[in-house]
Image: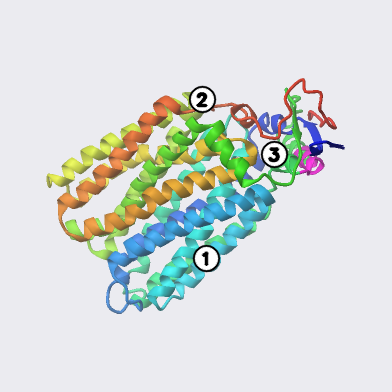
Amino acid sequence: MTTSAGPVPPTVTTAVPARLDRLPWSRWHWMIVVGLGTVWILDGLEVTIVGNIAGRLSEEGSGLPITSAQVTGVAAALYVAGACAGALVFGRLTDRYGRKKLFMVTLAVYLGATAMTALSFDVAWFFAFRFLTGFGIGGEYAAINSAIDELIPSAYRGRVDLIINGSYWLGAVGGSLLSIVMLNTALLPENVGWRVSFALGVVLGLAILLVRRQVPESPRWQLIHGYGEEAEQLVDSVERRIEEEKQRKLPPADRVITIHQHKSVGFGLIARTIFRRYPRRAVLGLSLFIGQAFLYNAITFGFGTILTTFFGVPTGHTGYYFAVIAAGNFVGPLLLGKLFDTVGRRIMISSTYLLSGILLFVTAWLFDSGALTATTLTACWCVVLFFASAGASSAYLTVSEIFPMETRAMAIAFFYALGTAAGGISGPLVFADLTASGVVGDTAIAFRIGAGLMCAAGLVAVFLAVPAERRALEDIAEPLSAVPPGSGRSGPTGRSGS
């Protein structure tokens, strides 16, 4: 069909989104969580290993002529810069070509770059492969978060998204403990241990790749892009599996939506949607990402240096301290995640940001006054990051669910890239210089900057956070391709499900 304005895109009326949201939790959902969420473990493993081996890499005999400041500063900034670039490139491709294709491609990029990092014998190559590793991880953030939120039922979306993003810290625990073994020169030579650490990350990634092959494409993406029949068939098969598992029939879906189908959405329309249609939400997303990016990228990349510089902790022992902090980071989303679905997004997002910022100010004061030891500093960080981790994870949840479906991956990519570029690239560079000075007051300044940005983001959330708890994605932000009710334009009617 055509009009004077050009061809009219086909429309479809379907209950697929409602059918997905009314599903009870099942083994199928656990498969989604394992297949998609475990990559965050790899990210945590990567970042933590680099932070903990910084001292060893800079030692004579490591096989790489590099300084500790270059590892925690330049290499860290390049990793984050790569993640920003990867998020933007792969985010656009994810919205255009689908979630499944891209979360396979991005993992392959990550694995290849990590393997080459282990084989680096020159500083320039080490820097290049750190950038490419980040490039793959950045693409993962866009592809994975959009797929998770489109596949998980609305009643569980908040806690699942937070816990999956928080699983980064399981990798951090593993990276910390692994670095203790790999840096033990009684077991492995100085120029081998750090290489084996990266190689083990590749092995874990290959295992995840095998599991991820079973994760389906997002039916919501299929509906928008002209694969309505495939979406219906996929949801039919999922419903049959869950009915067999639960030994009962599922209730019928309670709503349908009519949408125009198309192959892609232009970048200009995406930008206009985010900044003109939802300017308050854009401010919210940017604030949350800048706050958490500076805090985490500045502090976690340099924590090992703080321990060795100010408290004389041996390089091979820093992993013990970081493992404790990482465990606290994971416990935060694990224990607080459910409250984001029950108490609500606005209260939980604002309170976790504000609490972590205030507690970080207290930690900076204690550190500056000389009242802390390596152990008590670690304890303070556990408390700060218990709340900060839940807040940081909620940033990804927020930008994933408050914009229309057609822009989801690109919105995640944009806010991640912009927020991380502001706080994640400058953070490690500034922090490396401050800690390298050996002056306690300089390091305390970095703490205070991170605390101030977290508090500012929390205040923004008080006024601008969206009450998205237990709501369908299509209710939070109507798809750009949705046909207004009563317009008289409709297409084939999708089934409401069993």
Closer to the observer: label 3 or label 1? 3
Q: Is residue 362 visible?
A: yes
Is residue 321 found left or right of 292 in the rendered image? Answer: left
Report crowding for label 3: few under 14, some 14 to 19, many 20 or more residues within 10 A (C-alpha).
some
Q: Residue furthest right?
A: 1
* Residue tagged 3: 220
Res. 202 mark: 1
* Residue tagged 2: 467
Give the mark, 3 or 1, whose residue is nearer the N terminus.
1
Q: Label 3 is placed on what type of residue? A: Arg
Is residue 24 found left or right of 379 in the rendered image? Answer: right
Q: Label 2 is placed on what type of residue? A: Pro
Q: What x and y, as percent, mark residue 22?
A: 68, 28
* Residue numbers of the magenta segment: 226-236
Nearest the eye: 98 or 281: 281
The residue located at (17%, 46%) in the rendering is 367
